[in-house]
Each structure stands twice: as structure tokens, then as C-alpha cells.
Image (spheres, coloured by chain):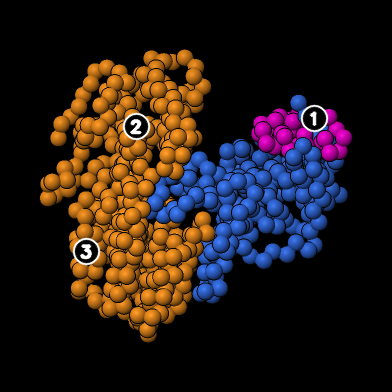
Chain colours: A blue, B orange
């Protein structure tokens, strides 16, 4: 029944879910939708365990999906019970591990007390990882920063309009959308922070400070720069 | 009830840890009284106690060391928790003990081990001496963590639990997905009918089902939760009240279908997680389960199926045509046995019978519809 998966102790739940789907002709919460990857090209730049995927289709839309829609592109694995489980067992191991099938990105959460919460945490983590790892092409000649990127810029950016609202920080769930757009731009300008800053109407110093304000963003920019043979940002 | 107040913070507070649990709580229930008063879970108690940050740090260090001393000995003994899980439980205990807004700051202080602000007073929902006592019970008596804090997080609910009531299991969460995805999405009119959760325990299935029914438009579905245990009845009623579902969920005392004679042949759904552990397996259960949870909720007779068979028989006469049932079982053997029983002994009673696996791939649930 259970398909042992990597990572030790996790099993694949797709079989059981598939059973319900076939048996009743209705879908369950955790269903993998058939997702076509044709039209996307994934360039794997493996460096120190990091992978960068490039896509020529609009994969930024992953982040615009609602939670249920994104979950439908995922395979969910929960912690494998040792022994018969159910009434036999009292161990609050509600670990959840989700794999985003189109990109292969895996996110997990173990620290919460219910599977519901762990699933929500894992999904939030998946969104961050997609933002960090999936790159989308940016048309530099006609570039104007999207609204979600403007939202994370400091108020002194000249492109920021009054309707952009207050600056959004890393703790806001909307930050990941801006972060993805920023990384797309930096990727398009071959990792040059000063070039990217020009497109955003701000100084190189101000953009550097923004990048350094979030640890995972900082690390992603440096991975990207390293892949282009540039020195890390400090 | 006796109220134990101690001045010191000696680790020997509960040196004789075989003493009755009631000594650790001022609001314990008495099993002999006819009217059971449910315990208030730790997270709902007022912040009427305090300790200095250094006293709390001292307790936390002691509790963490006690958890670490377990290593994997319980795992080898009876597949119980290891020290990693126990330390995680300790963090959850702190979550329930402290004011929510200060939890993360205090936790990071406790983890960092720095000695600043040690005189700061921290508001607590239980006195420190009780914390020494209950954590010792957790480790040395293997008292379930959920009984220590008086609640369990289940789906999106926080349910009160106490000795005498089965702690709802994560596997059982899936019954609600079956109600939603198999029964209600396909047959929305079922959302208007009467549903029964038999042997409700904490009321978990009944409350989650009621909340699911209420998401369906124009649904006036009701849930009746039954249980034989007076403690379960009191706790389920308390949980129903916490979620403000008194008008939707009715808790009735009695064995299985016995209190449901007025809805015979009218039920839209029958749900249950009945006792299914074979009697011979009870003594080998992990200590948290076998020594602390009610046998009434675990022991399913010699093969573990006596209550399950009774429920199938009952469902045949209690469900209306098109009504849905879902039962939790011990796994593959029991599920197959039930399906065989339905097909051979109840021909024509049910249709669309299916076995559904839980998240660990164990064939946990049997479900179907009344013909």
C-alpha cells in the first residue's frame, strides 16, 4: 500500500487518495492535478545543493494560485506511522511534507500540533521556495516593475507611487510575490545589483539594504551572482 | 477536592508519583459523582499565577533534562515517545501556559540561556509547583501530554480532553474529509438531515461534522452525539459549547443507537470511531494509551470487531435510503472482514462500499451508502 519515499519515514498518500477518487468519482483535498510541463524549460544550475529552475512560461502564477489550487499541484506525504496506528498510538507526530510536482520543490513542517496547521506552514514555506527558486523571463527593454515588487520597495524609490501603499516587509505573506519579481529582474540583468537598481529607480545602496533585510533573499541573490561568476553581496 | 499548595520549588514535590493524579489539580473531577464537571484546559484558564523568569528558566531546564534523559528508551519499551517528541511537547505546554503574545519572546529567552532580566515576573495559567508535578507525571507515569494540558489540537479545532475520554487521533481527521468529499459534495441534500456520531468521546467527529454541514447553503443539518461514558458526555457537551454549536449538536447519553430511537430510519449519516483494539493487544499498548486512556473506548472484544459489527447492523436500520456511513477500523484485516460481512450478511442493504486508507497507507475506514 504505502510507497516509501525519500527523507526517511514519509509515505506517499496518493494511493489512498486515488482510491477515493476512483471509487466515488469525486475529488479529495489532496489530489494531484495533471500538470503539463511542456513549454517550460528547467535549467538546473546545481550549486552547493541549490537548484535554480528557469521557465519560459508564466510560472509566477504558481504564487498567485489560491492555497487549494496550489495544493492540487502537490503530492502530500505525512509521517509514516510505525505499527498499526489509530487507537494503538498516541504520538503527536503530525509532520507534513508536500512536493510541488511541476517544479519538484519540497517543503515540510513538523513543529505544529495539528496536521492542519503543519499543512498551512508547509504551504507557506513552499511559496517562499518557489519565489526563491523559480525564475521567470523579464522583458528588459519594456520593463516596468510589477505592483507586487513596488510594494516591497522602500519609500525613497522614485518609481513608487502613492497608491503603492506602505512598504511590505518579509513577515507579510505578500512579500514572496515581490521577492520573486525582484529575483526575476536580478536574474535578467545577470546578477548586477546596480543594473537592477536602475530599473527600480533607486540607489544601489538602497537595493542592497533591501536584499540584506531578508536572509533567504540575500542567499538567493548570492547564489544567482555566484552562477554568473560575480562576488557575493555583503 | 484537595488543593495542594507548596511553597518551595523542590523537584521532590511529587516524589511519590504513584499518588492519585487529583492531587495535582484543584479542579479535578470525581468519577463517583453522578454529575461530571469537565476540567478547564490549561490554555483557557486565567493568568492568575506568576513566577520570576529565573524560576521559570530553572523549571524549564529541569523539564528539558528530564525529557532528554528518556532518550529512545520508551521507543524500545513500547513504541512510546522519544526525547525529541517530549521536548516538542514541552514547548506546546509553554504555549498553553503563557500569554500568547509573550510566548515566543519567553521561549527564545529560555532557549538562549542568557541571564538578563531574571527578576521579570511572568504571568502563568498554572502555579510552578503544579508544572513540576505534571511534567513528572508526563515522563515518569507516561501520562498522556493531552491529559496534562487538557486539550488536543485536531483538524482546525482545539478540543478539551481529560482522563476518561479517548484522545482524538490524527487518523480520525480523515472521516470529516470523507463526509465532505464523498457524501456532501455528491449528495448535498444529506447536509439537511440528521447525522449521528456514536461513541463520540470528546465530541471531535460530531463538532467537525456540524461545522462542515453548516458550510452548505440552506443546510439545517443536525448532529446527535451519543456516548455511554458520563465523562465523555460532559466533555463533549463542554466542547460543543466552546464552539457555540448547542443548537446544532445534541449530546445524548446511552449505548450506540439506543438513545436514537426517535430518528430510526431517518438518519442521513452514521459516523463512528468505535473501540477496535483486539482485547489481547490491550496489555501491549504504549503506556500512554494502555495505562491511561479508557478501556471502554479501546477494547473491541476478542477480534476487535464486536462494536463495529453492531454498528453495521444498526446503520442498516437507522439510516434512511441514500444515507452515508463511515467507520474507523484497526486496519486491513478488520476492514476486509466488515466488507465481507456487509456483502454476505446484509445483502441489498448497502451500496458503494469502499475501503479507504489513512495517511500512513493503512486501510483504516469502511464507508458506503444505505441502499
Q: Position of residue A49 (x, y in %)?
A: 74, 40
Quick check: can you spot residue B131? no
Q: Earlier in the sequence, mark 2 or mark 3?
A: 2
Residue identified by numbered label 3: B255
Marks 2 & 3 on one chain: yes
* Separation (CA) of disc 1 from disc 3: 70 Å
Instruction: Select label 2 or label 3 by which is in front.
Output: 2
* Separation (CA) of disc 1 from disc 2: 52 Å
Q: Residue at x 57, y 54 (%)?
A: A11
Q: Main secondary structure of the magenta part?
A: helix
Quick check: can you spot residue B45? yes
Residue A20, compared with residue B201, is above or below; it is below
- Decide: few, some or many residues near mark 1? Use Cα within 10 Å; few <14, some 14-19, many ≥20: some
The chain containing the residue under callout 3 comes to B
- Decide: few, some or many residues near mark 3? Use Cα within 10 Å; few <14, some 14-19, many ≥20: some
Q: Position of residue B171 (x, y in %)?
A: 44, 56
Q: Secondary structure at mark 1?
A: loop
Disc 1 and disc 3 in contact, CB within 8 angstroms = no
The answer to whether residue A217 is magenta is: yes
Disc 2 and disc 3 in contact, CB within 8 angstroms = no
Left or right for A26, reference B175: right
Residue identified by numbered label 2: B140
Q: Position of residue A74 (x, y in %)?
A: 62, 57
Residue identified by numbered label 1: A232
Amino acid at each position: 500500500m504505502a510507497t516509501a519515499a525519500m527523507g526517511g519515514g514519509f509515505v506517499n498518500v496518493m494511493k489512498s487518495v486515488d482510491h477515493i477518487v476512483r471509487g466515488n468519482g469525486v475529488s479529495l483535498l489532496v489530489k494531484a492535478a495533471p500538470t503539463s510541463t511542456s513549454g517550460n524549460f528547467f535549467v538546473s544550475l546545481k550549486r552547493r545543493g541549490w537548484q535554480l529552475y528557469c521557465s519560459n512560461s508564466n510560472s509566477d502564477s504558481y504564487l498567485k494560485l489560491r492555497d487549494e489550487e496550489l495544493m492540487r499541484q502537490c503530492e502530500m506525504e505525512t509521517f509514516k506511522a510505525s505499527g498499526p496506528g489509530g487507537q494503538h498510538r498516541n504520538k503527536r507526530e503530525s509532520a507534513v511534507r508536500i512536493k510541488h510536482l511541476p517544479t519538484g520543490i519540497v517543503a515540510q513542517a513538523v513543529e505544529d500540533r495539528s496536521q492542519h496547521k503543519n499543512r498551512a506552514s508547509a504551504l507557506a514555506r513552499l511559496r517562499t521556495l518557489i519565489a526563491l527558486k523559480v525564475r521567470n523571463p523579464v522583458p528588459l527593454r519594456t520593463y516596468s516593475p510589477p505592483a507586487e515588487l513596488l510594494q516591497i520597495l522602500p519609500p525613497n524609490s522614485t518609481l513608487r507611487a502613492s497608491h503603492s501603499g506602505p512598504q511590505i516587509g518579509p513577515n507579510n505573506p505578500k512579500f514572496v510575490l515581490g521577492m520573486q519579481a525582484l529575483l526575476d529582474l536580478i536574474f535578467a540583468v545577470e546578477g548586477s545589483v546596480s543594473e537592477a537598481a536602475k530599473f527600480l529607480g533607486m540607489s544601489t545602496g538602497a537595493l542592497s539594504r533591501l536584499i540584506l533585510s531578508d536572509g533567504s533573499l540575500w542567499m538567493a541573490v548570492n547564489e544567482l551572482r555566484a552562477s554568473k561568476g560575480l562576488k557575493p553581496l555583503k | 477536592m484537595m488543593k495542594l499548595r507548596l511553597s518551595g520549588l523542590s523537584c521532590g514535590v511529587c516524589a511519590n508519583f504513584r499518588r492519585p493524579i487529583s492531587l495535582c489539580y484543584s479542579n479535578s473531577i470525581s468519577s463517583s459523582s453522578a454529575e461530571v464537571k469537565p476540567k478547564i484546559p490549561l490554555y483557557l484558564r486565567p493568568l492568575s499565577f506568576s513566577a520570576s523568569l529565573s524560576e521559570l528558566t530553572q523549571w524549564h531546564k529541569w523539564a528539558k533534562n528530564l525529557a532528554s534523559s528518556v532518550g529512545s528508551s520508551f521507543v524500545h519499551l513500547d513504541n512510546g515517545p522519544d526525547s525529541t517528541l517530549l521536548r516538542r511537547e514541552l514547548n506546546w505546554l509553554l504555549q498553553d501556559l503563557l500569554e500568547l503574545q509573550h510566548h515566543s519572546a519567553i521561549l527564545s529567552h529560555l532557549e538562549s540561556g542568557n541571564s538578563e532580566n531574571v527578576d521579570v515576573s511572568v504571568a502563568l495559567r498554572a502555579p510552578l509547583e503544579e508544572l513540576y508535578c505534571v511534567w513528572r507525571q508526563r515522563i515518569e507515569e507516561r501520562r498522556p501530554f493531552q491529559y496534562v494540558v487538557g486539550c488536543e489540537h485536531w483538524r482546525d479545532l482545539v478540543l478539551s480532553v481529560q482522563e476518561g475520554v479517548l484522545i482524538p487521533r490524527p487518523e480520525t481527521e480523515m472521516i470529516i474529509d470523507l463526509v465532505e468529499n464523498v457524501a456532501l459534495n455528491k449528495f448535498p441534500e444529506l447536509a439537511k438531515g440528521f447525522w449521528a456520531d456514536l461513541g463520540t468521546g470528546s465530541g471531535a467527529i460530531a463538532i467537525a461534522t456540524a461545522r462542515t454541514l453548516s458550510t452548505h447553503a440552506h443546510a439545517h443539518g443536525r448532529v446527535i452525539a451519543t456516548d455511554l461514558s458520563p465523562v465523555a458526555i460532559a466533555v463533549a457537551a463542554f466542547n460543543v459549547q466552546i464552539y457555540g454549536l448547542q443548537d446544532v449538536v445534541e449530546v445524548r447519553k446511552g449505548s450506540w443507537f439506543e438513545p436514537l430511537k426517535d430518528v430510526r430510519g431517518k438518519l442521513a449519516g452514521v459516523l463512528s470511531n468505535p473501540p477496535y483494539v483486539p482485547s489481547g493487544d490491550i496489555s501491549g499498548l504504549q503506556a500512554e494509551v494502555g495505562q491511561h486512556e479508557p478501556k471502554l473506548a479501546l477494547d473491541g472484544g476478542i477480534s476487535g470487531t464486536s462494536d463495529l459489527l453492531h454498528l453495521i447492523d444498526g446503520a442498516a436500520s437507522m439510516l434512511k435510503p441514500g444515507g452515508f456511513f463511515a467507520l474507523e477500523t484497526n486496519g486491513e484485516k478488520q476492514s476486509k472482514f466488515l466488507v465481507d460481512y456487509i456483502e454476505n450478511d446484509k445483502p441489498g442493504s448497502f451500496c458503494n462500499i469502499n475501503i479507504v486508507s489513512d495517511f500512513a497507507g493503512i486501510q483504516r475506514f469502511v464507508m458506503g451508502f444505505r441502499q
